Image (tube, grey):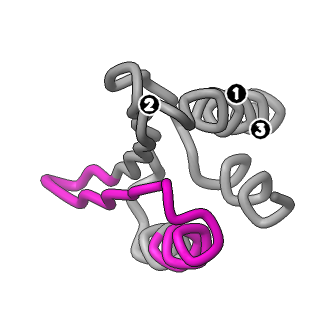
Amino acid sequence: MAAFDTFFAEAVTEVRRAGPERVQMVLRADPEIAGRAAELAAHETGCCSFFTFTLTATAGALSLEAGVDDRHTAVLDALAARAAEAMGADS
């Protein structure tokens, strides 16, 4: 979780609910951030296979969407709250 907290504080500029089972995190548009996001997503799905992550880079924007099945929405809620809290702490 420490790696995610650091990433959230350094990279996330906005957290949006994209549905009951999805959260979109808008990231600073930077190639290093994209690489770190991909690395964290790959690591997390290795231990928590219920997560899906989609990294999108388009028109100078970067976002990471996290999704879960309906049995794991509480975990997603906690992840979104951590991202929002870490993002706010860096402002």
- Percent position (x, y) of residue 79? 66, 39
Q: For the residues marked 2 and 1, what is the alpha-carbon distance in whole angstroms?
A: 18 Å
Q: Amino acid at mark 3?
A: Ala
Q: Residue furthest front?
A: 71
Location of mark 1 (residue): 81
Circle 2: residue type:
Asp
Mark 3, residue position: 86
User: Quick one: 15 or 41, which is closer to the camera?
Assistant: 41
Alpha carbon distance from label 3 to label 2: 25 Å
Element under label 2?
helix
The residue positioned 13% from the left and 53% from the top of the image is 59
The residue that appears at 46% across and 78% down in the rendered structure is 35
- Looking at the image, the residue that sits furthest to the left is 59
Please name the residue shown 23% across and 60% down the image: 57
Residue 33 numbered mark, or none: none
Instruction: Describe residue 69's horizontal placement relative to residue 10 as left or right.
Output: left
Does 62 sit left or right of 3 as displayed? left
Look at mark 2 in the image and give the residue it sits on. 70
Give percent across and percent down for residue 11. 59, 53
Residue 76 place in picture, x, y as percent: 58, 36
Q: Report the Cα–Cα distance between label 3 and label 1.
A: 8 Å
Q: Where does residue 55 sit, x and y in percent of width and height?
A: 32, 61
Q: Say above or below: 5 vs 30.
A: above
Nearer the observer, 51 or 13: 51
Tell which of 70 and 36 is nearer to you. Answer: 70
Callout 3: SS: helix
Check disc 3: other Cα within 10 Å, few if <14, some if 14-19, many if 20+.
many
Residue at 31 percent of width and 57 percent of height: 54
Q: Earlier in the sequence, mark 3 or mark 1?
A: 1
Magenta span: 38-62
